[in-house]
Amino acid sequence: MDRLSDRIKRLGYSQTFVMSNKAREMRAQGIDVISLTLGEPDFDVPDNIKQAAHEAIDQNYSHYSPVTGFIELREAIVHKLKRDNGLTYQPNQICVSNGAKQAILNVLAALLNDGDEVILPAPFWVSYDEMVKMMGGTSVIINTSYTNDFKITAEQLQEAITPRTKAILYSSPCNPSGSYYTYDELKSLAAVIAKHPHVTVISDEIYEYINYETSTRSIAAFPEIYEQVAVINGMSKGFAMTGWRIGYSACPEWLAKACDKVQGQMTSGANTVAQRASITALQTDPSKYRFMIDEFKKRRDLFYELTKEIPGFKVLLPKAAFYLFPDVSFYIGKTLDGQKIENADDLSMFLLENAQVGSVGGVSFGNPECLRFSYAASEENLREAMKRIKDCLSRVEIA
């Protein structure tokens, strides 16, 4: 008898972790692998944030917090949203969660009935489609490409919306493409969304601070759809706090109450010490942490130039986040040293096994013709990784 649920059998494993685990296994066998798979800043947590955590331990913040988080943290988030994004929220509209991933799941659980549709502009973060499945929904994918900077248009969005559309889920800045939506682009999307009050926008803004051009805009800034937007953010990327697991949502009050109910039955409040440290992080002027973004920009410029030298790779200069997402369609359908390449996942595995460089194929991102590389790594490793790939692809027999 099969004891697993149909729901869990519908889910796939995160391709990011599949490839990073494969790279670890090869390292354990003594193989020198450079893994550019995980989206994790390689900086240590800034000292002032660590000091706040020490103080929280000394002050015995070791008991349950409110489900939605300490009021002081929710007030700090409200202040941050006003300071950095021009958004007005109240603490009762904030739900602090165990990472931004849980914040998204809270919103989806609060919104979706079985069969409801969620629009996903592709490429999308690998977990979005699986999250929709987990909550009983159906993903409706809008395809984009290298030629349009991997962004959808208002016309595409209008065409995708149906009476069964419950939500639109996207990230800006985008994981994996490194693109972001400008004010004018968001304004055109907001005009479409305002015509469909049954649709909620889930705006994942976790890479907000890692923008090399300007400050990132939020679609929640358009008053005509404020009551339709759930803003998702967290501490992992901008503050190098990936392991601390603090994310949050900012929602209209009706949805915030529902997220409180969902989280109260799942996990209750997030880690108390991490919450107290997050207060300090958010209250500090963002310029104090700018050194990380400046370093990522240097690596981006280097990695972009190196990747352009790879035969068959087409790559855009990412404007944000810390990923390159080259189009590798040149290799799709070809045979490399006797191995048929059906999609970018096949090429990713080929490069791991033959060049000893880990990447993530684009199938689970909704774009099977691209590879994702994280440049949250040392310059030495970035140079060596691209040298290995260039050497590998220049010597293989292509049929």
Image (tube, rainbow, N blue to C red):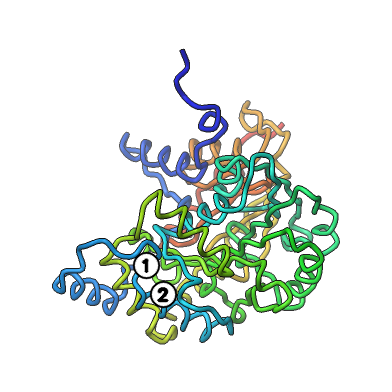
Count up the numbered dots. Answer: 2
Q: Where is mark 1, residue-wise? A: 69
- Residue at 50%, 42% in the rendered image: 14
Q: Categorize mark 1 by other alpha carbons within 10 Å: few (<14), some (14-19), many (20+).
A: many
Residue 67 location in percent, x, y?
A: 37, 61
Against 325, residue 273 (above or below) is: below
- Residue 395 vs residue 367, the one in the foreground: 367
Per the rendering, the mark at residue 122 is none
On residue 74, the disc is 2
Q: Is residue 340 visible?
A: yes
Badge 2 local density, few (<14 within 10 Å), some, or many (20+)? many
Q: Position of residue 138 (x, y in %)?
A: 68, 42
At a point 51% along the width and 63% down the height, the residue shown is: 257
Q: Quadrant of residue 255?
A: bottom right
Q: Amino acid at mark 2?
A: Arg
Residues at badges 1 and 2 in contact (C-beta under 8 Å)?
Answer: yes
Disc 2 is placed on an element classified as helix
Separation of residues labelled 1 and 2 (CA atoms): 7 Å
Left or right: residue 335 compared with residue 184: left
Q: Is 227 left, or right, of 246 in this rendering?
A: right
Q: Can residue 302 be seen at all in this image of the molecule?
A: no
Depicted 131 relative to depicted 107: above or below: above
Q: Quadrant of the C terminus?
A: top right
Which quadrant of the figure has residue 181?
bottom right
Residue sitting nearer the eye, 306 or 247? 247
Instruction: Work out whether mark 1 precedes mark 2 in sequence or the reverse, and give the earlier one.
Output: 1
